[in-house]
Amino acid sequence: MTIVDVFETDSDGKLLSYCPTFDNRAVHKTDQRVEKMRKGSSILKKNIHMAAKSPTAAKVNQAANLLGKLSVKYASTVKDTVQRKIEEEMKKKSGETSPKQQKKNTIQPKSDGFEGQNDSSGNEATSYMI
């Protein structure tokens, strides 16, 4: 069996641990850039978590929340304004129709001699013309 020396170092190259082991597998050296990247990423991750828990991060989150609420409120106001303008335009267009067309579009009772007569259930029968 082969004796393999395993060294663990930090990002600065300081020795953290040494462990001689018996191993029959092919052990190869880790590239120094890869090792630095792994150690650096764990430090970066730790710093990000620390920054996320800071009071400044809490204030930024509150500001973002407020901005989100204001934008939703503003969007709702714009929607209401646009809807009101559309309704006004539709009323204008329906007001511009001729009186003849308006008379055609309304529902009026049909006068064919049936007013005041009751149907079989006792209700007054009225027909309508559109």
Image (tube, grey):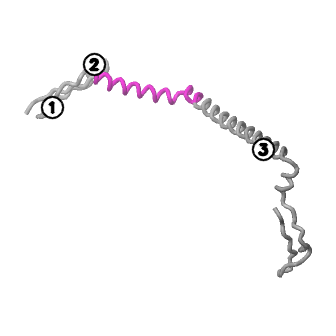
Q: How many marks?
A: 3
Residue under circle 1? Answer: 21
Q: Secondary structure at mark 1?
A: strand
Residue under circle 3? Answer: 90
Residue at image location 17% in from the left, 27% down from the top: 28
Label located before the other in sequence (3 or 2): 2
Label disc, if present, on residue 14 of the rendered structure: 2
**What's the CA distance linking mark 2 and mark 1?**
20 Å
**What's the CA distance linking mark 3 and mark 2?**
79 Å
Residue at image location 13% in from the left, 34% down from the top: 25
Q: Secondary structure at mark 2?
A: loop
**Residue 48 is drawn in which quadrant?**
top left
Give the quadrant of the N terminus. Answer: top left
Percent of width and height locating residue 95: 84, 45
Label located before the other in sequence (1 or 3): 1
Label disc, if present, on residue 79 of the rendered structure: none
* Amino acid type shown at disc 3: Met
- Viewer-proximal residue, 113 or 8? 113
In the rendered view, does 77 fall on the left or right side of 23?
A: right
Percent of width and height locating residue 105: 82, 55
**What's the CA distance linking mark 1 and mark 3?**
86 Å
Which residues lie in the magenta part?
32-60
- Viewer-proximal residue, 77 or 94? 94
| Label 2 Cα neighbours within 10 Å, binned few <14 / some 14-19 / many ≥20 | few
- Viewer-proximal residue, 82 or 63? 82
- Viewer-proximal residue, 95 or 20? 95
Percent of width and height locating residue 97: 83, 46
